[in-house]
């Protein structure tokens, strides 16, 4: 199995890991978003959905562990790439021309990813941890919507989701490129679809704090 | 005096090379690795030679002054490469390619060499395809061809407008393969500054490490020079900035005769000069002449915009003078015709330029076809000049482009210095007094892949040369000389920059040893060059140090050689009292202004032997024509 | 035909050698818009030499955009502001009176600076030597027309092969990655029938070499494609990724 490790450690291998884990995370986002949409159905709808998941708790735990690993890989690999890539140009240019030859989405993938990560930690602690392990007996709907009504939290949530959109706009088409699925016939479509996907995720999640904080949703 | 033995094998023209190969001595395969061969230059000729020699099992040391073998000047060739494949079924054959080349060279090349060139031309295409060179293809998947000047058949293979690049990368990859296998050791950023000769045989070279300035010594059983041409003697030419004559010139001074230095090719389709600061001239591929029509106004000093000049006031002078070949007339003829029109005061808007017009072709074939054929060339034109050739005609002007002359070699491509082989543009062998388009690439690769590897083997097996160690007194002496020369150059600290003097030399060469030459001008040129050389050694300013990267020093060393070579070119031109190919003596022309050869007295190769600075001895190798009849070259 | 000259301020990176600390030096120039960028530098150098001062070291050779020798970063962009050309093809008519222009060398760990604007790009050759070839011996090849190659395939291979090895892709990439350069060669041979026998060994060996010389990792920003003077497409990188994957699971 040494060859697997070696291959995944090569420059292209690392890209590959980023892409595979990225795609897995995008799938997770879709499911997570679908679930979150039931927030709009009100307290009962959402809690019913949560209840449904409670039924298959052992399975969810396994998924969570896998998800954790995927996150870890994605993040660990991202940091490693970032460090190595910094080292590949010890002295930067005095004039930065990157605005002329790259998009803001690809250029900032590491930064947007990092901020999303910070948010993720806060998000996990404030909702997932509290709900599962703190012993506080509050239903998830109340817990979530209460947080959404806290100004700084809603703002952070919103900004993080926006940056996540940036991150995805780069990540989606990037994964295809990494897998070698780039040809002039369909790649322009993939790029557009990636933007569409990023928008759906951003609007989907982003609407939640807007609804609960700004519009005073119940 | 050197004895010039051309060593042309006996027998019928068609059988010479085959028989010669058969009669060659072979090196025992087990012994090949005991032989070291130095190859200087990694252009088409050098890289292909290094690859093939390495493949055969010799230890090759390859040298280039470039940072990478892929940057040799061959990379810039645009148009294509000839071969007698006759894939078009238009009547081509080895004999026809041979005949066209001899005729194109105005009957001043060695028949046997040219025939061999035509013979191996087909192997080149196969070889390159095998290496993955992406030649242009037709819809059926087979190789495509285009036409080039001086031929009535379509035999030129091409890869977009980047044929030289693709062929060089082919040779470069072949050499890389040998580097990986350990058979070729590549030394980059090394400039050869001297040849080491021991008892009349080449034993090694002296190079300057261009990063550290160190003068290094390398020895071998044989030395191959493939260092390209010397058109930069004119300062402005289509050659790359760093092309130089230093390697062949220093070898010349060590005993290798220099043949036909005055045969230089002025290419008809280059971009005109924009001003004083011009650093080099840009070639527009000759392939443009397939569809473009060349003209000037019939009126003198016509300052109208080209599109305002009505059809009947235009003079399509090539079509008028040479109805059969028209715009595809050979280069020397086309260039001279342009010069005549300009000397007559009919240059485009009063400039030193003529028009190359695509209007008719666009009307006939549509813009799309023209774009497909020449799109990238049109873009280049627009980038450089800021004008759009789809709308108004291009302006072009002749420029020094290729040097047919070079070190004298025999049929084995060996100089009179034993064990010194010369390949590619650096030798004089195949193009006579004028080279046809798409033939230099052919010659470079023929020499490198298919000739030198055999003949070097024959020399090693036959003469059994011994290798001299680099602590031999001759090596020490040569190294010391170079160090002294470097010190001298750096110590002058005069008032003129290297480029300033080079530009002056270029003006002398262009005006007096350029497209039209005459006795008076040539004599003046010799005087002026001598004076300039003196001035150089007294008044040049070479800044910087010797033990560091020093581009100023590099240029100065090259210029020192041009200042001697320029004189020899003028001397050779003065000696050749006839007009042939690229050498046009104004005193010798037909009443219609065409070149007038003198076969009685000048059907020979002029091989000059260096005696001392400013003094040479002339050796003549008579040219005998057994297969072709000497005829006046007519493209009418 | 000379146009009115334009006045510019140049800030040029000067650095004595690999280990020295570099800094910008200022030059005021007045230049014809028909002049090329490198001719302008020639001019500055000629003036410096006249004063007995060391000229700016920069490299160039063909000055036609094909040899890949030249390569400067001009106002943060390799080969300057105009797309699809090399530095030597950049003409001064693209600048305005009064502009300030920063001229820097290509910067990457894999391209150490030698002097001023001159860098060492030999790592690119090492990658080529690792596998960028088709193993055929001289004369041991079939007739050129024995394998028909569809026109589109030949021209796609040609597009990849048009890489001039300038290194601008590395210089432009925020990660100093050499993926575009390497993929151009890998792709050329992967497309052609002649390249098939060594297709997977080649990509493996070349990527291994690439990873050895300190280039960064690709993060799909496509700056390389945007700055490549020959417009080599990132599709080649995709093809290389795919081939590399295949090479590994084969
Ligand atoms: C713009 C242009 C377009 C052309 N188009 C065509 C065309 O379409 N078809 C055609 O057939 N021909 C064409 N030619 C001509 C052709 O390109 C050259 O004649 C040919 O490539 C020369 O190849 P070469 O190997 O002899 O030399 P080069 O390619 O010039 O190589 C010389 C090598 O020698 C090395 N070298 C030189 N001096 C030294 C030294 N002192 N020490 C160490 N190394 C040294 C250099 O580094 C280089 O590697 C064209 C030429 C030009 C200028
Ligand atoms: S891919 Fe483009 S930018 Fe990179 S080396 Fe090749 S030509 Fe230069
Ligand atoms: S000098 Fe050759 S590409 Fe610019």
Image (cartoon, coloured by chain):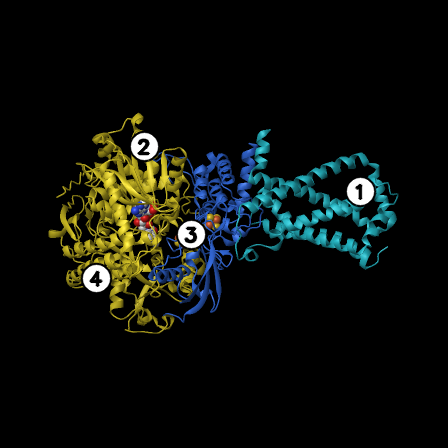
Indicate yes or no: mark 3 CB to ligand 3 under 8 Å.
no
Residue at numbered disc 1: A129
Q: Nearer the viewer, mark 1 or mark 4?
A: 1
Residue B110 to residue C103: above or below: above
Q: CA distance from mark 3 to mark 1?
A: 59 Å
Could you tell me which secondary element the residue under label 1 belongs to? helix
Regarding residue B322, the answer to whether it shows in the image is no
Residue at numbered disc 2: B58
Count neighbours of disc 1 (C-alpha within 10 A) and say few if under 14, some if 14 to 19, many if 20 or more.
few
Dot 2 and dot 4 within a common chain: yes
Q: CA distance from mark 4 to mark 3?
A: 42 Å
* Mark 1 chain: A
The colour one sees for chain B in the rendered image is: yellow
Q: Quadrant of residue C125?
A: top left
Could you tell me which secondary element the residue under label 4 belongs to? helix
Residue C221 is left or right of residue B409, and the answer is: right
Looking at the rendered image, the quarter that the N terminus of chain A falls into is top right
């Amino acid at each position: 199995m040494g060859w697997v490790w070696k291959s995944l450690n090569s420059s292209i291998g690392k890209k590959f890991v980023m892409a595979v884990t990225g795609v897995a995370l995008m799938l997770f986002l879709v499911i997570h978003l679908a679930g979150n949409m039931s927030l709009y159905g009100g307290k009962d709808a959402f809690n019913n959905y949560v209840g449904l998941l409670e039924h298959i708790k052992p399975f969810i735990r396994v998924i969570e562990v896998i998800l954790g690993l995927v996150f870890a890989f994605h993040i660990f690999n991202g940091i490693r790439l970032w460090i190595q890539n910094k080292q590949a140009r010890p002295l930067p240019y005095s004039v930065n021309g990157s605005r002329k030859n790259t998009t803001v989405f690809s250029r900032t993938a590491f930064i947007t990813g990092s901020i999303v990560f910070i948010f993720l930690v806060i998000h996990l602690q404030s909702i997932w941890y509290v709900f599962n392990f703190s012993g506080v007996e509050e239903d998830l709907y109340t817990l979530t919507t209460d947080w959404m009504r806290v100004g700084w939290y809603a703002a952070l949530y919103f900004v993080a989701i926006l940056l996540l959109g940036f991150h995805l706009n780069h990540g989606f088409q990037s994964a295809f490129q990494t897998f070698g699925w780039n040809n002039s016939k369909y790649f322009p479509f993939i790029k557009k679809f990636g933007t569409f996907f990023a928008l759906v995720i951003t609007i989907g999640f982003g609407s939640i704090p807007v609804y609960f904080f700004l519009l005073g949703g119940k | 005096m050197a004895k010039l033995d051309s060593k042309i094998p006996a027998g019928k023209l068609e059988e010479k090379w085959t028989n010669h190969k058969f009669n060659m001595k072979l090196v025992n395969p087990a012994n090949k690795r005991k032989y070291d061969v130095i190859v200087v230059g990694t252009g088409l000729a050098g890289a292909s030679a290094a690859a093939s020699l390495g493949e055969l099992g010799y230890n090759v040391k390859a040298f280039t002054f470039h940072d990478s073998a892929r940057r040799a000047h061959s990379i810039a060739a645009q148009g294509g490469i000839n071969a007698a494949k006759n894939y078009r079924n238009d009547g081509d054959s080895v004999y026809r390619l041979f005949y066209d080349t001899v005729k194109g060279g105005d009957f001043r090349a060695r028949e046997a060499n040219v025939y061999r060139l035509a013979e191996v031309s087909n192997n080149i295409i196969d070889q390159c395809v095998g290496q993955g060179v992406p030649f242009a293809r037709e819809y059926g998947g087979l190789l495509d061809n285009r036409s080039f000047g001086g031929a009535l058949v379509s035999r030129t293979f091409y890869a977009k407008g980047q044929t030289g690049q693709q062929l060089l990368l082919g040779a470069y990859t072949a050499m890389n393969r040998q580097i990986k296998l350990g058979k070729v050791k590549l030394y980059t950023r090394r400039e050869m500054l001297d040849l080491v000769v021991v008892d009349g045989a080449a034993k090694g070279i002296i190079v300057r490490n261009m990063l550290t300035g160190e003068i290094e010594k390398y020895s071998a059983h044989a030395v191959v020079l493939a260092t390209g041409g010397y058109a930069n003697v004119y300062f402005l030419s289509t050659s790359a900035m760093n092309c130089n004559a230093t390697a062949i010139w220093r070898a010349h001074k060590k005993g290798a005769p220099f043949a036909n230095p005055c045969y230089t090719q002025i290419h008809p389709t280059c971009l005109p000069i924009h001003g004083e600061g011009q650093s080099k001239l840009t070639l527009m591929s000759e392939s443009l002449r397939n569809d473009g029509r060349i003209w000037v106004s019939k009126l003198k000093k016509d300052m109208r915009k080209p599109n305002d000049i009505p059809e009947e006031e235009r003079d399509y002078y090539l079509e008028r003078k040479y109805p059969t070949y028209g715009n595809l007339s050979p280069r020397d003829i086309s260039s001279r015709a342009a010069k005549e029109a300009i000397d007559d005061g009919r240059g485009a808007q009063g400039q030193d330029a003529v028009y190359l017009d695509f209007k008719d072709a666009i009307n006939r074939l549509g813009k799309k076809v023209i774009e497909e054929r020449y799109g990238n060339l049109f873009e280049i034109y627009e980038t450089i000049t800021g004008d759009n050739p789809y709308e108004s005609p291009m302006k072009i002007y002749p420029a020094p482009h290729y040097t047919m002359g070079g070190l004298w070699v025999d049929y084995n491509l060996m100089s009179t210095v034993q064990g010194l082989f010369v390949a590619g543009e650096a030798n004089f062998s195949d193009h006579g007094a004028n080279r046809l388009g798409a033939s230099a690439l052919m010659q470079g690769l023929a020499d490198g892949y298919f000739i030198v590897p055999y003949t070097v083997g024959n020399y090693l097996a036959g003469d059994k040369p011994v290798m001299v160690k680099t602590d031999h007194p001759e090596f020490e002496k040569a190294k010391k000389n170079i160090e002294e020369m470097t010190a001298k150059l750096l110590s002058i600290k005069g008032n003129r920059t290297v480029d300033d003097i080079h530009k002056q030399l270029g003006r002398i060469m262009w005006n007096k040893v350029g497209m039209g030459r005459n006795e008076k001008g040539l004599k003046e040129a010799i005087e002026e060059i001598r004076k300039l050389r003196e001035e150089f050694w007294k008044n040049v300013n070479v800044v910087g140090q010797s033990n560091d990267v020093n581009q100023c020093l590099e240029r100065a060393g090259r210029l020192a050689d041009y200042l001697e070579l320029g004189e020899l070119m003028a001397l050779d031109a003065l000696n050749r009292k006839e007009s042939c190919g690229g050498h046009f003596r104004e005193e010798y022309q037909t009443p219609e202004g065409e070149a007038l050869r003198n076969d009685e007295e000048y059907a020979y190769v002029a091989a000059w032997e260096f005696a001392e600075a400013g003094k040479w001895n002339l050796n003549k190798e008579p040219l005998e024509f057994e297969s072709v009849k000497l005829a006046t070259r007519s493209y009418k | 035909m000379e146009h009115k000259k334009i006045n510019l301020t140049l800030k040029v990176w000067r650095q004595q050698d690999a280990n020295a600390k570099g800094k910008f030096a200022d030059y005021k120039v007045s230049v014809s818009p028909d002049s090329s960028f490198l001719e302008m530098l020639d001019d500055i150098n000629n003036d410096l030499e006249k004063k007995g001062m060391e000229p700016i070291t920069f490299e160039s050779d063909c000055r036609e955009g094909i040899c890949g020798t030249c390569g400067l970063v001009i106002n943060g962009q390799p080969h300057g502001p105009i797309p699809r050309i090399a530095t030597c093809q950049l003409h001064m008519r693209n600048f305005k009176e009064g502009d300030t222009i920063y001229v820097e060398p290509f910067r990457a760990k894999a391209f150490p600076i030698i002097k001023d604007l001159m860098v060492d790009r030999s790592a690119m050759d090492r990658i080529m030597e690792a596998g960028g070839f088709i193993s055929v011996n001289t004369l041991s090849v079939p007739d050129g027309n024995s394998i028909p190659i569809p026109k589109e395939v030949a021209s796609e291979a040609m597009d990849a092969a048009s890489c001039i090895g300038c290194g601008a892709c590395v210089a432009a990439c925020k990660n100093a990655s050499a993926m575009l350069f390497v993929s151009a060669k890998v792709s050329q041979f992967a497309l052609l029938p002649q390249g098939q026998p060594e297709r997977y060994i080649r990509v493996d060996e070349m990527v291994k070499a690439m990873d050895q010389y300190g280039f960064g990792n690709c993060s799909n920003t496509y700056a390389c494609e945007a700055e490549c003077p020959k417009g080599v497409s990132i599709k080649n990188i995709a093809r290389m990724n795919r081939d590399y994957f295949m090479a590994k699971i084969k």
